[in-house]
Amino acid sequence: MPKLLTEDEAVVSLVDISVDVDRVPVLRGLDLTVRRGESVGFIGANGSGKTTLLRVLATLLPPTRGKGRVLGATLGSPACAAVRPRIALVGHAPALYPQLSLRENLHFVARLTGHRDGEADEALELVGLGGAADRWAEVCSQGMQRRAELARVLLTEPALLLLDEAHAGLDTASAGLVEAVVGRVRARGGAAVVVSHDHPRLLDVADRVVKIADGQATPVQPGPVVA
């Protein structure tokens, strides 16, 4: 069981992390520190390693080389299993059961995580899905599915939020939803890592932006950037 984080300990600390997938280098010598209350944005071309990095941070993919800690757990160690319930990963594919309604999906998560059904219903209302809560997930639009995923984040209150293509499928009416959800995580002393191709919108949600290219991370200076 990993120890609780001290007040000064980083939520994420990666040192010289490299990851090979099928013997192909994907991440190379990457360093990253993310502290309590911080949001870090990542940009980069397809195949640059952004999703691989999120899988490492979710403790689902151990690094090939280097060392790191997430929420006090050493990457690649048995302690990672204990911190996974405190990590929320919102990926490209929705983590929804297609033949359950949005409400049933959220109620299922609530029962797994010790929350009340009423809290799940409230989360759906907060993301604008109260009127569509009884619709099957498989017939919902990409944007609705993404909002349901963000409702899961509001319900489970993670210490580390990982968003892959955070704004994908969200219309202009939902423009501030990602920012609001990330803001709640940060306000509780958690941290967020947000991946997006939309650099201008990323600036609204991240304290700093990092570009991944050829598996390596480089800080992005303020101003227009081509990913």
Image (cartoon, grey):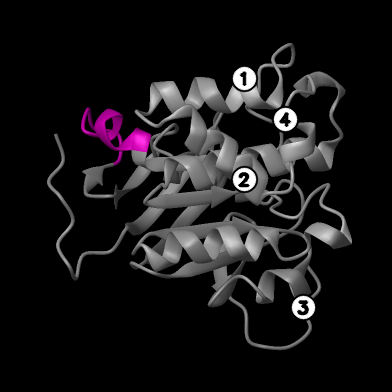
Distance Cα–Cα, label 4 vs label 3? 39 Å
Please report the bounds of the magenta region as a residue range: 75-85
Asked which secondary structure carries label 4, the reply is: loop
Does label 3 or label 1 sit earlier along the sequence? Answer: 1
Look at the image and say whether residue 152 sits in the magenta stretch: no
Label 3 – label 1 distance at C-alpha: 41 Å
- Quarter of the view holding residue 60: top left
Badge 2 vs badge 1, beta-carbon distance below 8 Å: no
Residue furthest top as drawn: 99
**Residue drawn at x 23%, y 32% as measured from the top left:** 77
Type of the residue with mark 4 = Ala
- Residue that numbered label 2 is attached to: 150
Q: Is residue 83 magenta?
A: yes
User: Which residue in the protein does label 4 denote?
Assistant: 133
Residue 14 location, x and y as percent?
A: 35, 57
* Type of amino acid under label 2: Leu
Whether residue 43 sits left or right of residue 88 in the image: it is: right
Q: Is residue 215 left or right of residue 16?
A: right
Label 4 vs 3, first from the N-terminus: 4
Disc 2, SS: helix
User: Is residue 219 at least partly visible in the picture?
Assistant: yes
- How far separated are the C-alphas under marks 2 and 1? 15 Å
Give the residue pinned by disc 1. Answer: 104
